[in-house]
Every structure is written in structure tokens, then in C-alpha cells.
Amino acid sequence: METNVLILGSGGREHAFAWKIAQSPKLGNLFIAPGNAGTMRCGKNVALDILDFKAIQNFVLDNSINLVVVGPEEPLVKGIRDYFEAESALQHVRLIGPGSIGAQLEGSKEFAKKFMARHCIPTAAYKSFTQNELNEGLRFLEQMPGPFVLKASGLAAGKGVVIPEQLEEAKRELQEMLSGKFGSAGDTVVIEAFLKGVECSVFVLTDGKDYFLLPEAKDHKRIGEGDTGLNTGGMGAFSPVAFCDTDFMAKVKERIIAPTIQGLQAEGIPYKGFIFFGLINVDGNPFVIEYNCRMGDPETEVVLPRLENDLLDVFEDLFTGRLGEISPQFSHEAAATVVVVSGGYPEAYEKGKIIHGLDKVADGLVFHAGTQQRDGEIVTAGGRVLAFTGKDDSLDRAVSMAYAQIDQICYEGIYYRKDIAR
Ligand code: AMP
Ligand code: GLY
């Protein structure tokens, strides 16, 4: 039977999902809501609000959708799976992503920290504080060495982590966070020990019992070259990551992936979806920096080009209990993606700039993020605009391919980092 798929989201990640799923011989119709100017070339964009579950239900039923792939975290944290499970008309529809409790791994840093403590999963030591515990929080900071890692516990669009070097600044930050700097996301603040090491991201798809490992990746979070300036959603990524060798990955599986999935199972938290482990390698040992309940963006733009399995097959196995039986096939080639953004991002930026030259770029590995089709032209419609992925035996050449593609395009205010994967 053919699978009719609806992908929720509008970023480079969702374009990469659409591109990969469109290659499957099992695909019937593909819809992306709301999508962007790139996803239109893989399927049909539909103007749906991804938080309007009733509207999504109607669309799913009207279009005989049997698989829903949820790109971003917000619908998951807000319970889209719980909604689908509660509606009798939707029982036959498969949805990729955990329920709202499983999504708390990302939606509440405090929940994630407590979960890791219960299951002895290596992570930085921490303590959390609410508004009426400000004084205890300030005293806690005084007793620890810097740098000081402060995290708003709730969802803050990737902006809720600050790492001041100085005690006075850390105290001021704690005060501001607890008084609403990140809205209610900062009602609880997690303060944790600073870990010194190199970061990487590991992804699995799990049915709550077994898991399918995807290629690992590393992203560049800061806006400026040399990892300087403000944090962004991600300015580029590459895969594979040299230090994620067999030895390191064996530790990741044994100390982090397996106990996480066993922990979910032991606590009766069903989980059918992606887990993104944000890790840090401290002297050869992996620690969890954060969990996400979805794939990464822009990591997906290098992970999926390296995955050789048919993604619809893998999703099928997720629901038939066969996930543990298939072996992940990764391309031996490396992939690198460079994100081009709107001038001003991640602060205020203008939209609606005409993007020239896209027709000159070889189609396959250009993933659209903040783009829109308008009067026959493609214009910018977000902070992160396009992700250019190169793929080659050598990572160096993959990176050069990505930059060579970027040289073909231009729009007013274009900015990108020149040092991705270098
Ligand atoms: P998060 O949103 O939790 O991934 O944090 C954002 C970034 O802050 C991470 O990618 C790390 O670079 C940094 N970070 C978070 N927690 C720690 C920590 N305990 N030690 C050092 N760096 C951290
Ligand atoms: N690139 C980081 C994220 O998707 O959270």
C-alpha cells in the first residue's frame, strides 16, 4: 500500500525530510504544512497552523494521510500525539514523535535532569531554582567555580541558555531569568556545572524498546566565525564527526542511548520518534548536554543525505516492532551544510528579499528554510534562508561544494559563515 505523508514544519529540516521521503517507491502523496519554496518541489504545501490539531485532523482525514512526520518540538510538547491517540477517527494514522510526557525530555530541562539522575546517565551536576528560591540560587552560584551555566527550564527557541564567566553577571542573569527574561520558560532555572570538551549530536529513531541509529553530526551554533557572537538555531553542520569513532560510540550506546530508552520504558513513557542527544566529549567520555524530542536543524540536512535506508521503510518498521532488526546503512561519503541567513539574524532582520541565481544551483542538495514563492520569484521569509549541502569522499571537498553553490546566489543582506567544518 502506498503511504500518504504529511510533514509538519517549514524549515531546512522539513525540506530534507521531504526530499528524502520523495525518493521512496512506497510514497503516495506528500504534503508539507506549511512548508517553504523548496518543499513545494517535493510535494504539495498546505497552509495549516501546526499547532491547530483540529485543522490537522481534518486535513489528515480528507486526504487519507497515513503517516505524519512532526518536524519541530512545539506540537510534540503541546501534545499532538496525545491528541491523535485520543481521537478514534485517527487510530490508523501513524505519527512520528513522542507524546507530551516523552517530549518533556526537551520541553523541561528540569524533567530531563531528574530523568538522567534516576537512570545514572552522565550529565553535568546541577540544581534548579524557582522564583521564590532566588536567594538559594544566588548562594549556590557563590559556592561554585565559573563559568556559570544557567538554563531556562522550558522551551525558549534555543535561546534559553546563558554561560557568564563572572559571578556578578551570573547573579544578574539568574535574577533576570527568574523575573521573566525568557517568559514562563524561565520560571524554573537549572544551574549546572560547566563541562569542558567538544560537542557532537547523536540521533536515534526509537519505538520505545529498540532503536535505529542515524549518522552523527556536529553543528555550529554561533553567528560569527571562530564560534563568536550570539547563539543561533545553527549556521552549519557536518557529518561524520572524527572523534565519534567505534570506541566513543560504544560508550554513547552503553552509557547514554540504552539507559535512556530503558529508562523511558521502566517509567511507562511510550516513545515513538526521534531522540536527539546533544553530547559533549570530556576526555573521551560522553555526557548529555541536552535531549531533543525531534531531529536537529541544520543537522538533518547532513544526516539524511548520508542515510541510505528508505526512510518510509524505517518508519514502517517503527510501528511493526521490527526496528531492532534493520541495520542502518550510512554512506561512506561526508556531508557538510552551510546555512545562509538574513542580514541581522539572529536579531531583527528584513524579509521579502528576492533570491537570485537559485536556478543555477544543482537541484538536489539545496534545502530551503525561510523562503517563499511570490509572483514567480523566490524571496526570503525567515532568519535562516537556505542550507547548501555538499557531499563527497572528503569532508574538505564536501565543504567546498557547499560554498561553490552559495557563490551562485545572492540577495540583499546575505550572510553566512566561511568557516563551517574547517
Ligand atoms: P543547550 O540548549 O542545553 O544545548 O545549550 C546550548 C549550548 O550551551 C550547548 O550547545 C553548549 O555549547 C552550551 N552548554 C550547555 N550546557 C553546558 C555545560 N554544562 N557545560 C558547557 N557548555 C554547556
Ligand atoms: N541545531 C540544533 C537544534 O536543532 O536544536
Image: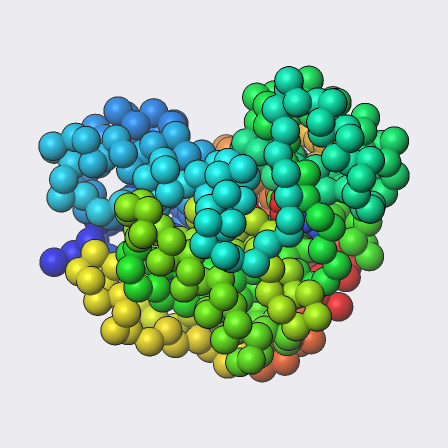
Q: In which quarter of the image is residue 242?
A: bottom right
Which x, y percent locates residue 303? 49, 64
Q: Residue at x 54, y 44 (%)?
A: 113
The quadrant the N terminus occupies is bottom left
Q: Where is residue 389 in the image (x, y as percent from the top left)?
A: 58, 62
User: Which residue is at a point 25% across and 31% down the rendered structure image?
Assistant: 83
- In the rendering, at what x and y percent does residue 259 appear? 42, 60
Q: Is 23 on the left-hand or right-hand side of 277? A: left
The image quadrant where one finds the C terminus is bottom right
Percent across and percent down for residue 86 are 19, 31
Question: On screen, 175 above or below 114?
Answer: above
> In this picture, is 257 found above or below 143?
below
> Of residues 419 and 208, which is closer to you in this image?
208
Q: Residue at x 50, y 75 (%)?
A: 250
Which of 401 and 182 lies nearest the eye of the viewer? 182
Q: Image quadrant of residue 34?
A: top left
Front residue of this view, candidates 17 and 367: 17
User: Residue at coordinates 78% horizontally, 53% vertically from top-left?
Assistant: 227
Residue 370 showing in the rendered view: yes
Q: How many marks?
A: 0
Answer with left or right where residue 13 lies relative to residue 393.
Answer: left
Q: Which colour scheme is used?
A: rainbow
- Residue 202 falls left or right of residue 414: left
Identify which residue, 218 or 66, lies in the foreground: 218
> Does residue 35 show up?
no
